[in-house]
Image: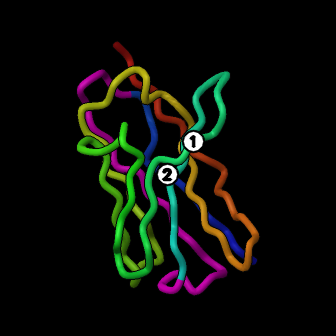
Amino acid sequence: QVQLVESGGGLVQAGGSLRLSCVASGIIFSGVTMGWYRQAPGKQRELVATITPRGNTYYVDSMKGRFSVSRDNAKNTMYLQMIDLKPEDTAVYYCNTDIRLRQYWGQGTQVTVSS
């Protein structure tokens, strides 16, 4: 049974930083691409970044420079380091993987950035 569990969200002031974690179980973590998505109130869920098993990363243009995705395959964990946070970064952040064309999602972790 695939399970993805996010943590690390919270309330932070604009300009602050947070590091999100996503722990995976039930999969061969070292063999799958992982991704971070976010969904702001009233908006569609959007891609933030992805990371391949070997650590190759992709970022949506608006996230480049402030967000950094990484993974520790020994711990079955993916991270999202976020700096210089802005109120528009307020959203629920989800981790995701795609195995045999089936999408798996965590429950999400809330990030709230106050101005």
Q: Tell me, for residue 46, which label it has, or none.
A: 1
The residue lying at 67 percent from left, 22 percent from top is 42
Q: Is residue 103 above or below residue 65?
A: below
Quarter placement of the C terminus: top left
Report the span colored magenta. Answer: 12-31
The amino acid type found where label 2 is placed reads Ser
Q: Is residue 45 above or below residue 34?
A: above
Q: Tell me, for residue 84, which label it has, or none.
A: none
Say whether residue 47 is magenta.
no
Q: Position of residue 66 (x, y in %)?
A: 26, 41
Q: Earlier in the sequence, mark 1 or mark 2?
A: 2
Residue at the disc numbered 2:
7
Please identify the quarter of the rendering in which residue 114 is found.
top left
Please identify the quarter of the rendering in which residue 101 is found.
bottom right
The residue lying at 57 percent from left, 41 percent from top is 46
Q: Secondary structure at mark 1?
A: strand
